Image (cartoon, rainbow, N blue to C red):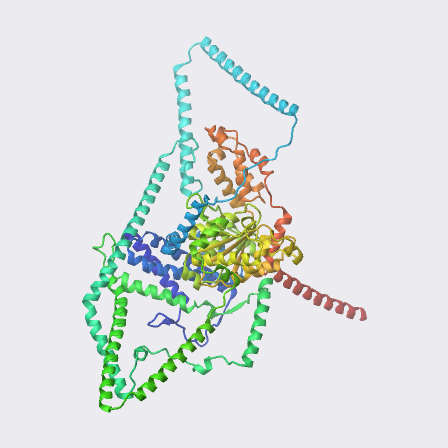
């Protein structure tokens, strides 16, 4: 974990990125600005590829971009050189953006579920000889540091002050209820009978132990009466027992060591409370690594602060050394240009705009400006109406789901990456090759900033400040020169100032006219604000935050105790592609859910560059059975991005909206106003299906104090449509049943379909359930591996199999009920603890379960929004038509045979 190690990792990542840039633009080149030049068409070359080839191409790209992203984000976290980190950050943003773009292209060319975010890459991984763990997307740790800008820190300080003022505490990580197992009611006689039975059992066990002790004592007496044992026989017996014990201990240790080496069991799997030497070494190594990472982060902060402090002194040094030369050169250039323009054209320029246009002419376009402009008038209006109609049709089509089939042949042009992002990646690679690969750092042991690179960084700012100063001073000198010439000419002409007065009067009138016109233009351009903006008035951000905290809408996600996405227990579906090939429908695995959340929510919300250049996603719907982790994922998104948390759930808004529409509009506008100003922000709505419930006008008027989500619906939808790519605001809606009775599911789909995502959170599959049982039992304080290896044969695979349909929340509640702290404290040896799988089965049967009808509704909703249902209908119709035509031909042939 030295400087050189991370430098080599950075070098390896840039080499891989260079290969990816070449793959994205294989036959073309790049100009001096890094813009890709498309390759000319080759006669006789294939112009199309198959859909499978396109899917494989983008699958390879996606996996390689994931590897580059992992290496670069690790370098950005641990490299301490301040100037290196700035360039690495540019590479990291461009890589994340291209990664999301490749994922979108990959999903579009999936032949089984085109457009779905749940893509199975197990076949591609197997071809590359990689493991599914290589596809895990880490959450960049720098997002929490990045979003500590002064304005965000100030906003969070306002939240802390308001919460302290109103006596509020941190929002709990999850609203969990204590586990209550329903027990049958019993009478006093039944209770006495149970106590008697247990007491009699205890007495029986005591008598059994006493009888056993007497039998052992009697056996010893018989041995004494028979005389002493032969010493040789006694020694052989002791040796046999001792050697057997040593062999068993050795075998168990080797078995545990092999399983740890293969990654099949974690450390401390012996279960005897004694750490093995391997465990001690492993813990010591992990602590050392953690300490080294912390030290490097502290050194990184020190170098960063030193660089910022020294940058101003470097700037002053450049101004003192190079400033006079730049100033003299600029003065001469501009003065000579002004004199030449006056001599040749007679124009006395009042600024140097034309001088800069002459030095930096605009790029020449192929088409003239007249052809580039769209025609206006009636025809343009008609086209606009037509476009609006087409847009409405497209939106309706999107709401129903895209039912278009993926073509079997695709043009080769789709394999070429976008010009902007590929150009940015090429410029990053070129800068690394030209600067960092050649830089000699043999004497820079502390990895402080490089003085020459700092000079190059401040040089443009110095030149710009000198340019502005020279322009102002030179124009002032020229104005004085023109004034002196005018005075001299006035003295020579011997004329009074009548014409001058008239000219001044005209000029004054013109000035008034110009002033009035300017005022008119300003009035014309004045932005019309909405009702909520008018009602909000000049209220400051601090006042808005104070009011929202008092109402319980703005809440704070605590820094400690929050479950992160790393604690979201998942496992991969290793045969997803095989199942899809066999037309077997599968729920998305939790590993795919976690990757989709990182790609669609965390990366765009954490980086402004990624948000503006990646596919737009302003709203996310998390739907699934209770206990599937929807609330945990929502809070983890806000935690990882250090986002402000706004709770607009019906429970949070109860009796807080006021009684008038103006108060509702003001509150909704205040929420979105603070969210945009304090970005990144998360607006959370639990049971969001209530927002799209179909309510009659009479019922809405009657319930003036209830149905909070229905009251904010109009203003909420309007503000949601106003979100752009520059607003790092994410709306997260959670629901258990998106197709519940009384819900307009079409409106709900269209809300999240446009610039949004709908993520299905199902109950876990077998592999994930197996990990859940092991993790929850271990977290309860019982060594699950010692339990499995006990003589009782604790079959944890049986638990994972019979718990199908139960969510992670139900499994965790069952484990907590079976293994309370009081019972765990009495366990010394898990193999002799008396824990059996029947204990868990009995409690699990009383936990919430995902029944078939609920799961069928969720699956039907998923197939509807992904277009699978529409594609199945088209395929069935085509098969029916083919069958009808075939039956018609058979009938005609039978008629001919009968005639014969």
Residue closer to the observer: 649 or 493: 493
Residue sitting nearer the eye, 217 or 392:
392
Image quarter of the C terminus:
bottom right
Residue at the image position 23 percent from the left and 85 percent from the top: 487
Instruction: Tell whether 490 sits left or right of 542.
Output: left
**Is 744 left, or right, of 272 in this rendering?**
right
Residue 126 at least partly seen:
no
Q: Give residue 752's quadrant in the image.
A: bottom right
Instruction: Tell me if residue 137 comes above or below residue 465 in the rendering.
Output: above
Residue reaching furthest to the right: 899
Which residue is nearer to you in this view: 843 or 769?
843
In the rendered image, is residue 719 in sight?
A: yes
- The reply, left or right, for residue 857 in relation to residue 4 is right
Front residue of this view, candidates 139 and 404:
139
Residue 499, quarter of the rendered image: bottom left
Farthest residue toward the top? Answer: 225
Tell me residue 855's x, y (percent): 61, 50
Q: Position of residue 519 (x, y in %)?
A: 43, 74
Report the number of discs: 0
User: Residue 694 in the image: x percent, y percent?
Assistant: 64, 57
At a point 30% along the width and 81% down the height, the residue shown is: 349
Residue 500 in percent (x, y) is at 31, 86
In the figure, 526 relative to 862: above or below?
below
């Amino acid at each position: 974990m030295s400087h050189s190690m991370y430098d080599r990792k950075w070098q390896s990542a840039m080499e891989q990125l260079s290969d990816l840039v070449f793959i994205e633009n294989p036959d073309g080149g790049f100009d001096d600005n890094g813009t890709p030049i498309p390759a000319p068409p080759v006669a006789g070359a294939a112009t199309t590829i198959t859909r499978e080839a396109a899917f494989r191409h983008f699958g390879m790209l996606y996996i390689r971009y994931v590897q580059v992203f992992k290496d670069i984000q690790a370098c950005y976290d641990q490299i301490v050189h301040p100037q290196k980190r700035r360039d690495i950050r540019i590479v990291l943003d461009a890589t994340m953006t291209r990664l999301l773009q490749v994922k979108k292209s990959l999903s579009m060319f999936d032949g089984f579920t085109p457009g779905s975010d749940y893509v199975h890459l197990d076949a591609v991984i197997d071809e590359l000889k990689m493991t599914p763990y290589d596809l895990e997307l880490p959450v960049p740790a720098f997002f929490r540091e990045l979003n500590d800008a002064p304005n965000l820190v100030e906003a969070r300080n306002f939240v802390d002050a308001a919460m302290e003022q109103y006596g509020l505490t941190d929002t709990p990580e999850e609203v969990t209820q204590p586990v209550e197992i329903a027990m049958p009611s019993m009478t006093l006689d039944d209770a006495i009978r149970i106590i008697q039975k247990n007491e009699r059992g205890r007495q029986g066990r005591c008598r059994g132990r006493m009888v056993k002790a007497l039998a052992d004592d009697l056996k010893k007496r018989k041995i004494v009466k028979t005389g002493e044992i032969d010493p040789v026989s006694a020694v052989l017996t002791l040796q046999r027992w001792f050697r057997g014990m040593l062999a068993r201990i050795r075998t168990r240790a080797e078995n545990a060591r092999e399983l740890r080496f293969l990654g099949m069991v974690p450390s401390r799997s012996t279960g005897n409370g004694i750490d093995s030497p391997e465990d001690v070494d492993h813990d010591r190594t992990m602590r050392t690594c953690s300490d080294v990472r912390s030290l490097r982060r502290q050194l990184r902060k020190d170098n960063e602060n030193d660089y910022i402090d020294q940058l101003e002194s470097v700037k002053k040094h450049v101004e003192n050394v190079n400033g006079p030369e730049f100033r003299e050169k600029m003065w001469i250039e501009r003065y000579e240009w002004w004199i030449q323009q006056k001599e040749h054209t007679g124009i006395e320029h009042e600024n140097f705009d034309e001088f800069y246009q002459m030095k930096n002419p605009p790029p020449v376009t192929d088409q003239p400006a007249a052809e580039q402009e769209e025609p206006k008038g009636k025809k343009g209006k008609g086209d606009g109406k037509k476009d609006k109609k087409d847009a409405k049709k497209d939106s309706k089509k999107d709401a129903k789901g895209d039912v278009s089939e993926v073509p079997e042949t695709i043009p080769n042009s789709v394999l070429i990456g976008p010009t902007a992002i590929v150009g940015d990646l090429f410029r990053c690679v070129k800068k690394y090759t030209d600067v960092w690969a050649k830089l000699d750092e043999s004497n820079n042991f502390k990895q402080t900033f490089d003085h020459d690179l700092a000079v190059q960084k401040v040089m443009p700012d110095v030149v710009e400040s000198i340019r502005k100063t020279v322009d102002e001073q030179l124009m002032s000198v020229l104005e004085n020169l023109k004034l002196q010439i005018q005075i001299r000419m006035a003295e020579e002409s011997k004329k009074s100032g009548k014409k001058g007065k008239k000219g001044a009067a005209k000029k004054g009138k013109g000035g008034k006219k110009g002033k009035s016109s300017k005022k008119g233009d300003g009035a014309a351009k004045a932005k019309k604000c909405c009702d909520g903006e008018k009602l909000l008035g000049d209220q400051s951000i601090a006042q808005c935050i104070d009011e929202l905290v008092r109402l319980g809408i703005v809440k704070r996600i605590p820094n400690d105790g929050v479950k992160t996405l790393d604690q979201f227990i998942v496992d991969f579906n290793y045969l997803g592609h095989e199942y899809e090939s066999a037309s077997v429908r599968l729920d998305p695995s939790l590993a795919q859910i976690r990757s989709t959340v990182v790609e669609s929510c965390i990366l765009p919300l954490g980086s402004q560059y990624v948000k503006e250049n990646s596919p737009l996603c302003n709203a996310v719907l998390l739907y699934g059975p209770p206990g599937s982790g929807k609330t945990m994922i929502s809070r983890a998104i806000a935690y990882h991005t250090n986002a402000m948390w706004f709770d607009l759930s019906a429970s949070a808004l109860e009796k807080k909206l006021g009684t008038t529409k103006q108060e509702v509009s003001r509150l909704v506008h205040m929420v979105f106003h603070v969210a945009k100003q304090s970005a990144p922000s998360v607006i959370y709505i639990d049971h969001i299906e209530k927002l799209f419930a179909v309510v009659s006008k009479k019922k809405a008027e009657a319930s003036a104090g209830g149905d909070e989500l229905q009251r904010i619906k109009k203003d909420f939808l309007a503000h949601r449509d106003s979100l752009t790519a520059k607003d790092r605001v994410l709306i997260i809606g959670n629901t258990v049943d998106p197709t519940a009775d009384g819900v307009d599911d079409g409106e709900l789909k269209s809300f999240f379909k446009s610039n949004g995502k709908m993520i299905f959170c199902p109950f876990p599959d077998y592999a994930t359930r197996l990990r859940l049982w092991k993790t929850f039992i271990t977290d309860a304080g019982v060594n699950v591996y010692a339990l499995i290896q006990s003589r009782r044969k604790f079959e944890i695979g049986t638990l994972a199999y019979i718990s199908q349909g139960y969510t992670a929340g139900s499994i965790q509640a069952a484990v907590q009920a079976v293994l309370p702290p009081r019972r765990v404290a009495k366990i010394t040896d898990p193999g002799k603890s008396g824990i059996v799988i029947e204990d868990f089965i009995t409690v699990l049967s009383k936990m919430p379960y995902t029944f078939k009808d609920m799961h069928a509704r969720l699956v039907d909703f998923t197939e509807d929004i992904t277009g699978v249902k529409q594609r199945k209908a088209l395929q069935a119709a085509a098969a029916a038509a083919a069958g009808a035509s075939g039956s018609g031909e058979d009938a005609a042939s039978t008629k001919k045979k009968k005639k014969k």
